[in-house]
Each structure stands twice: as C-alpha cells, then as structure tokens.
Amino acid sequence: MNRLWLYLPLAVFFLLLGFAAYQLSQPKDEFVRSAMIGQPLPNFTLPAAMPGGQGVSASDFADGQPRLLNFWASWCLPCVAEAPHLDTLRDEGATIIGIAIRDRPEDIARFIGQHGNPYAAIASDDISAVQLALGSSGLPETFVIDGRGVVRYQHIGDVRAEHVPVLLAELRKAAR
Amino acid sequence: MMAELGLAALWLAAALAILQLVTGIWSMRAPELVAITGAVRPVTILQAVFAALSFTVLLYLFAVTDLSVELVAANSHTAKPLLYKITGAWGNHEGSMLLWVTVMALSGALIAGVEYRLPERTMQAVLACQGFVAAGFYAFLLFSSNPFARLPQPLAEGNGLNPLLQDVGLALHPPTLYIGYVGLSVAFSFAVGALVTRQVTPDFARAMRPWVLGAWVFLTLGITAGSYWAYYELGWGGWWFWDPVENASLMPWLAATALLHSVSVLAARDALRTWTLMLGVLAFSMSMLGTFLVRSGILTSVHAFAVDPQRGTFILILLAIYIGGALLLFALRAGAVAEGERFSVASRESALVVNNVLLTAILGIVLLGTLYPLLAEAFGERVSVGPPYFNLVGAIFALPMLAVLAIGPLLRWRRDSLQRISRPLIVLAAVGGAALVLTAVLFGVGFLPLAGLVLAAVLAVASVMPLSGRNLRRVPLAVWGMVAAHLGVAAALFGMASESAFTSERLVALAPGQATQVGPWQVRFAAVQPVAGPNWTALEARLEARIGTGAPVVLTPQARSFWAPAQQTTEAALATSWNGQLYAVMGGAADDGRWQIRLWWKPFVTFIWYGGGLIALGGALSLAGRVADDLKRRRVRARGARRRAQMVPA
C-alpha cells in the first residue's frame, strides 16, 4: 500500500501529459471572431478613397439588398491573392463594397489598375475606425451585410476559390 | 562559413553528450576500465566547450547582422544598437534554446570540473543523466529549431527585434532565468544519480546544496528582474500578471525554495531523504514544463514565441521521457532508500516540513491554475484563470507559510518546545498587534493587504531574531544569508501589500499647462515635444511633479514609434523616492488638443524588488559561506593527509 503512493506523482504527471497531448492534437482555432455578428452595422460615414469616387455610410446598407463588405489595402499582400476571386464574386452577381485601410489614393489606383476593380464603391478608413468597430482585426476580411444593415457573416483572411460558393450561399441566406 | 562552424560545433556537442551518457553508464557497470571511467569528466567538459563555441558563433552572427542566416534576418536589423543586436540572439525561440543547452552543458562541465565529494558511482550516474537530458535538447535544436539555417538568398534588411525586447532588462533577464532553470538540472541529475545508486546521505546533501543555492539565486534574480521589466516596460502599472509564462518561472522557484530547505534538513539531520529526491526531480521538471508551455502554444500568453505544434510534440516527448523516467525511477527506488532520522513535532525540522508542504501546496495551486484552461478546454469549455483565483487561493497557503517562516528559525533542531521560545513569541505577537492596530485603524485597508502588512512587520522582526544574543563577528555566513533572505521576504511582502492597499490612480485628459493631483503629488503637464532615438521617433510629454512646495521632479513618458518592425510602444516614466514611485504613461491625443495621461502613485512598491534582491543576496551569502566552509574543510583534510604522509617514513 505504502509503495503505491510513490507512483502518485508519475500518475499525475501522465494524466497532465495526456491532456497536453490531446490539446496539441486538436486543430487550433486561432481566429478572433467578431462580436458584431447578428448586430446592426455601427453608424459610420467614410469618404471616397479616390477623387471622383463615392463615399460609403452605414445607411447605404439598409436598402433591402445584401452586400459584401470587404476590408483591404493596396499594401496588403494577401489582398492581391484574393483579387481574382472577388472578381468572380462580382461576376456571380455579388455587390462588393470596399473599405481601404490606411491607404493612399494613388496606391489604390495603381492596385486597381493591376488587379481589377470588383468594387461598387471604395471608401477610405485612415485610422481603421470602422474596421475596429466591426470587430475586424486583420486584412483582408469580408463581411456579409443583409438588406437591413445587419452583419450576418464574417470571413477572416483572403477569399480563396473554395470560399466563393460559401460567400454566395451566405449572401442568398441574407436575402431571405 | 561562420554559420556552418556553429552548426558543426552543435553537432559535435550533441555527439559528445551521447558519449557522456554512454561512458557514464559504462563506467558504472565496469568500474575497472580506467580508460572509460577516466573519460567521463573530460567528455563532459569538451561537450560544454563545443556548446559554448556554437553559442559564441550565434552571438557573432547577430553582432555583425549576417542577413544570410534566417534567424538573424527574422529577428534583427542593421539599424539596431549593438547591444540589442547581441541580446537579439536570445530574443527568439532558436537562440534561446541554444542558450538553454549551452547553460546546461556549462553547468555539467562545472560539476565535472570541481565536484569531488560525491561517491564516484553516483557522480558517473549524475553526468550520464546530464548527458542524456542535454542530448534530447540538442536533438530538438538540430531537428526542429536549427538556429544556423541559411536563407536561399541573403536579405537586404532584417525584420527587426520586437521593440518591447529592446531594453537593458531583456539583456539580462533571460540569461539569468536560464541559469536558474537549467542550473536546477544539476539537482535533477543528482537526485537521479542518488536514486540509481541508492546513496542518500548528509554528504550527498552537502554536495547538492551549493548547486541548488546557485540556481535558486539566479532564478530569484531572474524573476525579480522580469517582474520589474514587465512593470516599467509594458506600461500597465502592474508587477505580476499571473501569466502562464510568469507562472512557469514561479513554479520551479517554489520547488527550488522547498528543495533548498529540505536539502538543509538532510545535510544537518539526515532526515527527509525521499522528499528531497522528489523535490530535486520536481524542480527541474517544472523548468522543463515551463519551457514546454512557452514553446508549444497550448496556453495563450503574452510571451508569444513563434508557436509550432510540431515543436510542441517534440518537447512533449522529451518531457515524457525525462520527467516520466525520473518519476518512474523514483517510484521504483524511493521505497528502497532507507528512512532518515526521526524528529519531534516542535523542532526546526517540523517547521521546515510544514513550510515545504505549504510551498508545495502553493506550487500545486499555481500549476492547477495555469493548466486549468487546458483541462477545461479538453471538456469543451473555454476559461481563463486570473488574479482573483491566484491571489486568494495562493494567500490561503502563503499566509500560514509566512507565519511558520517567522517562528521556524527560532526553533532548535530535533527537539524543542514552544515554552523555550515564549519570549520571542510574545515580542512577535506584540509587533503583530501593533501593526494590526496601526494599519486597520489608521488606514482601514482590506483583509489581504492588511494580513500582508501585519505579517511583513512580524516577519521583519522575526528574521533578525536568530542574530540576537550572538557575537555578530562569529555568526556564520550561512546564517547571515538566512537572515537576509527572510528579511527580503518581509520586504517584498511589505511592498506587495502596500502597493495593493495604498496605490492611487488617475486617468486624465490634460492640455499643456494644466495640472492634476495623484496621491501627495501635484503633477503639471508642461509640454509635448518630439524626440528621436537610434531606431525610433517619439512624442514625449514633460510632466513636472511636486509634493507641496518641494522641488519639482520631471517625468518624460513617451509614445514611441519604431520603424523596424513598425510598432508603437509606450515608455512609462518613473520617479522613485524612498517611499514609493510615481508612474506616468502617455496616451493618445484627443481632438481638442488635450492628451491622455495616466498616473499612479505606488507607495513602497519598490520594496518588492528590493526584497527580491535581498532574497537573492541572502542566497549568495549562504552559498559563499558553504563554499568557504567546504574549501576550509578540504584544506584541513589535505593538511592532515600530508602530516600522516610525513609521519609514515619516520
């Protein structure tokens, strides 16, 4: 009996090790999800990103039509990778509103010249205010906003080919 | 070429670690093979030489910013000051692991070079164990974290070092902590060696004690420095956050503190044999666990190293082998270690046992709190365990432990009675009562800080009592060490309780020219000006603080922008006086030309780190005393042997 006590530390250690091994084997969800899902858009008005363009405000989203809201920047490399898939989304009928983060008009123009312009409008958010208000912590990120201006879905990271049908389905869901 | 030299040295060191393991085991099996037994110590020393060479090469690569090396390119930048180029060598995963094994190899070499008190067989087992542990960490470096990997194309410029790490505190904090962590590997190997040979004697304890003391001193310094670094660099005004990585450094310290005291009981009274071995295994196990927690990314922490599940798996396997193996050996052999001497309830030993149990309980609480999110997540729940748990539950065990700490040193070894020490006990009770009345009536502080302040007063008086009635010139250094360390605990406790009870905080928006009040300080916001450093620019606020009509003290907190990598940091400004610190942080600008200024007045907060320093000093005094005693004993023995040799021919 007395001898068995000596095995206690070993047993405790392997129990802990088991938990740690289990934890390591689990895929890690590193994403910080927005708390704004299901909430109406925070009130905002942003100026156009390029001269002659059109600004964006929260009230624009309440006209009954669901939209994609895409946060991006000309300096963001994954945004280059995502550009062709945004084009596909537009061709499939999605309306995409772009918000350029901490960007310059001439850089935005150059980016669009090189990678195409999938956006119905591009606004400029110089201090990430709207981005932060939406609970987005990185670029690029894409939100599905329904026709009443409610945030319905958040896609973190660049949009890849396999995400296009997912986003289209979310848009259809938001239209119902 | 240099990077390849470093890598070659690392491979050689790894091979020598394996050779050390093989020759160690072989010479235990075949003590008559002098060629093998004689090789164990030289091989150990040679392993350290190559490890040190490898680390020196890494330092050189960082000093010259060799951007063809991936690690340098990812963590350094040509525009950094030279000091931070060099310290950048261990501000990353690979470099810090190389530092880790280098320290381990050097401590192994130190035992091989100077430790001759252990029985030779135990010594061989100890060195074999050191080689075995080191080999695993070399494999980890070589197969999953090569610090010398080259880039296919050299970069034109490096990525830079996290600006928070560009600080003198960081230059010293990790190496100090690592010497402590890894120094405990010596205690671990000693415990394993003793379990293998079943020789646990007071001589064994006397041989083990200086190594434990040395590691513990560095660990204490490392934790104290880390706490102060977090306090002034992170700009949150707190000095301990119960972050998993902080806990990872506290746990080995708690185990080492317990070990330090139990090894003394073993040395003085030949008691607590198995318990001492257990703690020896536990202390280094906690160090390795700490390493695992930081590197694997299974716990979320502010000390975010680049995390990689593959590395986590590697370290997990190493932990299973080393800790699991040592605990298995303990389970199989500890029963065979003969029971030590007995002692009565009222004795120095008993007090030390109670303290040991309470320290271990605190260790258990910290371990549980640190790993609880991990356990809960396995059952699908996400929780985080924070200060309310640690402070309250920790205090439940820490307060009685500190009370016993006040009384224990007054008791005699083996057998004593509370009647004999009734006079000092009455004095202590009177001090405690006076402190209670003073703090409760004058300031009306909450329960925990109140208990802390009262205990600090009692402990401060109690810690110097072992000196009373003695000729101070004849008090051994080890006793001075104990007094200093216990006084340090009292000082740190006083600082913690005072900070928690009396801190005043003010968050205000001020325009230049306006003033505010925090604690006794009148603080005037004089101006904002731009300043530039070697790799940053900053906005600096000029604050003039004064008490009453006294001379103003100028504080200049900054909001810094680093450009490599681009990052904003806040540099807190501190004004230290004998009775506390004024802490200022500059925030952002409001639209109307006002600036956010955050101010804290923290009475006696500095005592936390003075206390930590005093604890480490106590350890160092003790160590010096023990080593001096040992050298003296060795000289006396040598003289005796010489005399006997001279007498024989006559």
Image (cartoon, helix red, strand yellow):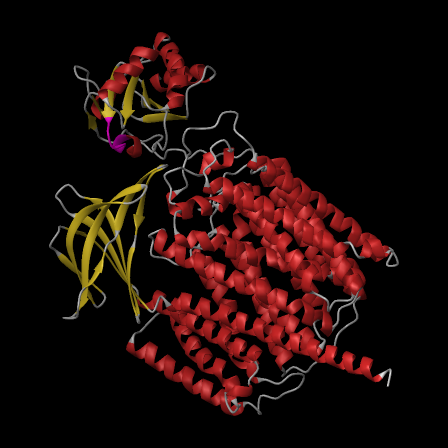
Q: Residue furthest front?
A: B650
> Residue B142, position in %: x, y?
63, 38
Badge count: 0
Work out whether residue A55 or residue A80 is closer to the camera in this orientation and state it.
Answer: A80
Is residue A116 in view from this perspective? no
> Residue B199, position in %: x, y?
78, 67
Is residue B390 in view from this perspective? yes
- Taking the magenta stretch, the answer to whether it contains residue B177 is no
Q: Residue furthest top?
A: A91
- Is B409 positioned to the left or the right of B515 in the image? right
Work out whether residue B373 or residue B8 is closer to the camera in this orientation and state it.
Answer: B8
- Taking the magenta stretch, the answer to whether it contains residue A126 is yes
Residue B605, image quadrant: bottom left
Task: Say which quadrant the C terminus of chain B sits in.
Answer: bottom right
Relative height, residue B162 to residue A62 (above, below) = below
Relative height, residue B498 to residue B165 (above, below) = below
Task: Say which quadrant the N terminus of chain B sits in.
Answer: top right
> Residue B533, position in %: x, y?
29, 45
Work out whether residue A10 or residue B464 is closer to the camera in this orientation and state it.
Answer: B464
Residue A59, image quadrant: top left
Relative height, residue A38 to residue B53 (above, below) = above
- Is B268 positioned to the left or the right of B293 in the image? right
Residue at image x 56%, y 87%? B474
- Is B188 positioned to the left or the right of B522 in the image? right
**Residue range corresponding to the magenta coloring:** A125-130
Residue at image x 39%, y 10%? A88
Residue at image x 30%, y 71%? B579
- Is B125 positioned to the left or the right of B536 in the image? right
